[in-house]
Image (cartoon, grey):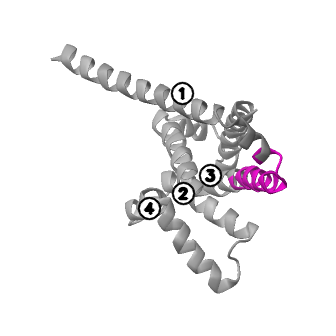
Amino acid sequence: MGDKFEFAISLMAFAVIIYMFISIFYLYVAVGEHWNLVLSALLDSRVHGAILISVSSALLVGFLAMITSFPVAYLLTYIEIRGKEILETFLIDLPQTFPPVTEGLVYLLMFERFGLAYTYAAVIIAKFYVSAPFTISFASRRFREIRESGMDIIARSLGAKTSHILELISKLFKLFLRMVLYGVS
């Protein structure tokens, strides 16, 4: 039974790998036939502006998501409240289930009322809605791993205060941030 299951998994993985290689190859061939269009687009100042907005907003949203998501993840891990599962559903699961086009349309309608449509602030807010659930989910898993390992209980039994434990955890997250930045560069 195990051999058949492994074979099925291997076959599916192989199919996905082949699909990805074919898609990537096709994209490069399609672009390769029209390099003059690609080069002219890259020299366009509007494309430079779009790239600048995209990269700067992604960096800002990543930073904001990390700063705001860690306290939320800590609360979801260590504080026992009624309806915590519902709160997790609204903060993590639900935003990830909406199609991006639907999210964009809802934000466009909402931003028009406040005069924010087509602004840099609107880009930041919309990207934050998309990225924060992933950051909260990641940080919650890390906090749960710490809690399940008992490191926090051991630290408290040795006299560490919550602030000291959080300081040590923040050092771990700084290390994680360095790894992310090395991965980006």
Type of residue at label 1?
A: Phe
In the rendered image of this protein, does residue 165 appear above or below residue 114?
above
Spatial separation of the CA atoms under disc 2 and disc 4? 25 Å
Mark nearer the N terminus (3 vs 1): 1
Residue 25, numbered circle: 1
Q: Secondary structure at mark 4?
A: loop
Q: Is residue 25 left or right of residue 163?
A: left
CB within 8 Å, label 4 to label 1: no
Specify the amino acid type for callout 2. Leu
Front: mark 3 or 1: 1
Tell me which numbered mark, 2 or 3, is placed earlier along the sequence: 3
Residue 1 % position (x, y): 15, 17
**Residue 86: x and y, percent?**
39, 64
Residue bearing mark 2: 75
- Amino acid at the residue labelled 3: Phe
Q: Nearer the viewer, mark 3 or mark 4?
A: 4
For marks 1 and 2 on the same chain, the one whose residue lies earlier in the sequence? 1
Alpha carbon distance from label 3 to label 4: 23 Å
The quadrant where residue 117 appears: bottom right
| Label 3, residues with CA under 10 Å away: few <14, some 14-19, many ≥20 | many
Percent x, y of residue 18: 42, 24
Q: Which residues are magenta?
A: 41-61
Camera-nearest label, 1 or 2 = 1
SS label for mark 2: helix
Residue 177 position by quadrant: top right
Q: Earlier in the sequence, mark 3 or mark 4?
A: 3
